[in-house]
Amino acid sequence: MAILLTETTETVLPDTRAEGDRLWLSAAELEAAIGWSSRPEGFCRANICVPVPPGREREFMRGGQIDVAALWRHLGQPLAHSADGGAWVLGTAAAERESALRSLQAPDFSLPDRTGCRRSLSEHRGKKVLLVSWASW
Amino acid sequence: MWQALYEELKDHGFVVIAVALDSREEDPLPWIEAAAPTYPCLIDRDHRLADLYDMVNVPQAVWIDERGTIVRPTEPAGAYEGFRRMDRVTREMPADAARVTAQAKATYLDALRDWVRRGDASEHAFDAERARAHAPRPTEDAARAHVLFRLGQHLIRHGQPDEGDRWLAEASRLHPESWAMWRQRAGVTELGLAAQPDFWARVDALGARRYYAPVDMKGMP
């Protein structure tokens, strides 16, 4: 079993096994966890497809399973996992963050308030927002 | 601090969203209860806001207009480096440092009032070109640090505190500019006040350098 954390999701993968730096998922798990699917033309999400480099298929696929870690690295994105392979985090590359910030469209997020109710930045569209960090520490 | 400002400006189509970068959700609760905010006060255990907006400390803020466009990217929210001259025992600032700190805060709040009332006509709202010029440029190490920070927090919450703390330490090592990651960990490891000498060591290590880039705002010290 492994848990896969992306920016916005936490997916428990009961049948998944980690092997060192590899995390093998079924095609269905891959799509459910990160929204990418395996197609004949490569790995696709929405209308973007990234071809698998010719001759390197075995780095990414094995008996119907996909190594999500290899895919994530191939996409140029950072990732990390616990020593026992039980927890994996897929992150976002600096270049992608920078281009989002340079677009000037404020990145949306949703976080809980003290009652656990999740609130999004985008709920406040139509108002001017002071988005400010603070901390108890 | 933000409640009074929100009350003053809320009828001008304005809202404050305060995000606590606090990995233990119980930590900010007493502060929230004391402030009794009527604006959204959110709890960000994984410092996701810092990742998305390249924030490195608190308080830092972003101004976002009615269309969801950033008109002032991440910058210190009226904070000034006067704390660097604070007496480390009494925690008091020399009068001149206190004056400059108060001036920085007043300048920031006045600029914010001006923008809320006058919108794009305010000289404090950047046009697209200036806003882009001020947009932060996160590094690959910072991006990786945020991944490790999230992994560490997950492990701490799920019964693997020792390994979790090692990832937090590695995150902080990769992203030393983030005092948020470092100060959060000082709390997580129960160092509490014991972290103070380390904190001042970090301050001293800056030497003559400023921690924050100067804020591009008329009247800001």
Image (cartoon, coloured by chain):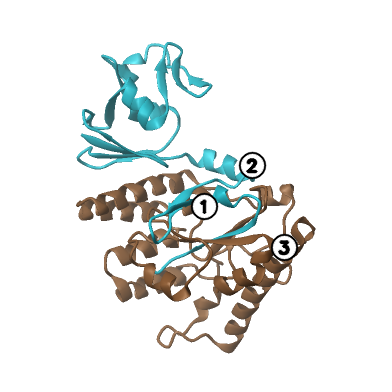
Task: Note whether residue A70 is visible.
Answer: no
* Position of residue B196 in the picture relative to residue A92 (left or right): left
- The shade of chain B is brown
Locate residue A98: give its quadrant: top right
Tag 1 and tag 3, C-beta contact below 8 Å: no
**Same chain, labels 2 and 1:** no
User: Nearer the viewer's eye, disc 3 or disc 2?
Assistant: 3
Considering every residue shown, the one lying at the far right of the view is: B121
Q: Which residue is mark 2?
A: A103
Q: Residue at x 42, y 17 (%)?
A: A52
- Secondary structure state at the residue bearing disc 3: helix
User: Nearer the viewer's eye, disc 1 or disc 3?
Assistant: 3
Q: Which residue is mark 1?
A: B54
Q: The residue under label 1 is which amino acid type?
A: Asp
Q: Position of residue A21 (x, y in %)?
A: 27, 32
Subunit under mark 3? B
Q: The residue under label 3 is which amino acid type?
A: Trp
| Observer-nearest of B28 and B77 | B28
Looking at the image, residue A97 lies above or below residue B6:
above
Looking at the image, residue B47 lies above or below residue B99:
above
Q: Position of residue B6 (x, y in %)?
A: 60, 68
Q: Which residue is mark 3?
A: B115
